[in-house]
Amino acid sequence: QTDCQYGCPLGRLALEIDPENRPAHKLIAENFQGWVGAVRECVEQMKDRLPRDTDADALATYVLAVMEGGVMLSRSYGSVEPFDRAVKQLRQHFRLLRAEDSGGKSRRSRGKSAR
């Protein structure tokens, strides 16, 4: 139990460091890019279950933004509920993407049936 007191250290730094301190913000951005890259790898692993035109980079950035925003809201409210609600909507977004993928058929099964 953290009582929502902690949050993301990088998110805190990004908000607290003077915007003119470009070297510090560059390092923070590089770290966030690493996180986006890790999420993008997960998106790539499930690409056969997503619409063909899914932008893996944009989706990975969206996932990180939802998670970071959820952490910030939870800390502000002193409750994990905002984070849970954000994650619930993120899961719904993925369900909708999967449903959009030609009625739920994967690329592999579509390719096999077309042959």
Image (tube, helix red, strand yellow):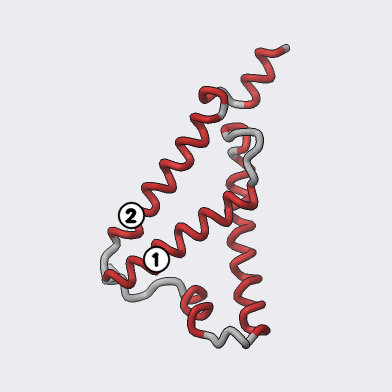
Residue picked out by circle 2: 84
Answer above or below: position of 112 versus 82.
above
Q: Position of residue 81 (x, y in %)?
A: 28, 58
Q: Residues within 10 Å of mark 2 (few under 14, many from 20)?
A: some
Q: Position of residue 3 (x, y in %)?
A: 26, 71
Question: Can you tell which quarter of the image residue 33 is in?
Answer: bottom right
Query: Which label's residue is closer to the chain start, 1 or 2?
Result: 1
Task: Tell me which residue sits at (59%, 26%) in the image.
Answer: 106
10 Å crowding of disc 1: few (<14), some (14-19), many (20+):
many
**Mark 1: secondary structure:** helix
Image disc number at residue 106? none
In terms of secondary structure, where does tag 2 sit?
helix
Q: Quadrant of residue 95?
A: top left
Q: Amino acid at mark 1?
A: Val
x, y percent for residue 1: 27, 67
Q: Residue at x 58, y 62 (%)?
A: 35
Q: Position of residue 98 (x, y in %)?
A: 51, 33
Q: Is residue 28 above or below residue 97?
A: below
Q: How many marks?
A: 2
Q: Residue at x 63, y 49 (%)?
A: 41
Q: Which residue is mark 1?
A: 71
Left or right of 71? Residue 114 is right
On the picture, is 57 further left or further right than 16?
right
Q: Amino acid at mark 2?
A: Asp
Residue at 32 percent across and 75 percent down: it is 5
The reply to whether the C-beta atoms of the residues labelled 1 and 2 are less than 8 Å apart is no
